[in-house]
Amino acid sequence: MKKLRIGYSTCPNDTYIFGGLSAHEKEASPAFDPVLADVETLNEWAMEEKLDITKLSFFAFFKVRKAYALLHSGGALGRGCGPILAARPGTDLKDLNRGIIAAPGNLTTARLLLTLYLGYEPRFRQMVFSEVMPAVRDGGADFGLIIHEGRFTLDAYGLHAILDLGQWWEEETGLPIPLGGIAIRRNLGERTARAVDERIRGALLLAESGSPMVSDYVRSHAQEMAPSVIQQHIDLYVNRFSRDLGHEGQDAVKVLMERAEAAGFLAPCALPLMAC
């Protein structure tokens, strides 16, 4: 069987979860060909149906549901881990209607959440997520939508949080915040989807066992991120929903999708969310 192309980001939570996929690959099936890219590139590739399996923002997933379905494992959901809207000191939330917001991509869940919160489409300026905080610090934007490890490094850029979209979502719905999931091409079938789910769970178990191979893999892709920030990132974004969405996780995804449909951002789709 040919290797399946699987895409995920270089962020510590993804490299932690997927770093062990190559272990025991000679004996395991299916085999994988990993492709690493930033979250918005993965979202755009999903629109082009470029990969067999991919990590992607849930907003992007909703737009590609005819081609892809969700796996149970490997996703990013949780509590206290949602996107943050940040700004320079002296900037207030009331200035949003006339400010420019640096955002980490058109298809990110962060962008969808802020638009749902506001009830209108603000003035976004799209850029790679790593450029968002520098752009706000240097005056290239008035606000920044912060994702990933940015919540741990705001102070270093002289910024402060003025809105926690994860907190808003949790208070509004009582559900965990659904940020990103792992999707597989529907035409690969349920049997392959189940096998991939098992491989991802196995890789996560290997990471949780303290495997040096996984630790080295995470560090090799973390660029100049401090070890403490790497661990904070993993602790926040890898949790029980990473092992299995479960009923609560699936409910959170459905509610976000229904709200996006009600707001007119998505056309309804009758296909099931899950691949198996």
Image (cartoon, rainbow, N blue to C red):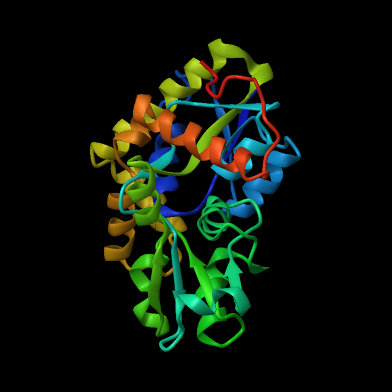
53 sits left or right of 233 in the view = right
Q: Nearer the viewer, residue 55 or 35?
A: 55
**What x and y, as percent, mark residue 160?**
38, 78
Residue that appears at 38% across and 73% down: 161
**What x and y, as percent, mark residue 156?**
37, 81
Residue situated furthest right in the rendering: 48
204 sits left or right of 265 in the view = left
- Give the image quarter of residue 202: top left
- Report the number of discs: 0
Residue 149 at least partly seen = yes
In the displayed structure, 63 sits above or below 135; it is above
53 sits left or right of 225 in the view = right
**What x and y, as percent, mark residue 139?**
57, 87
In the displayed structure, 212 sits above or below 149; it is above
Residue situated furthest top in the rendering: 191
**What x and y, as percent, mark residue 261?**
62, 38
**Quarter of the figure with the N terminus:** top right
In the displayed structure, 90 sits above or below 199; it is below
- Give the image quarter of residue 247: top left
- Give the image quarter of residue 252: top left
Residue that appears at 67% across and 26% down: 269
Residue that appears at 45% across and 33% down: 21
Residue that appears at 65% across and 20% down: 270
In the displayed structure, 44 sits above or below 241; it is below
Residue 23 at least partly seen = no
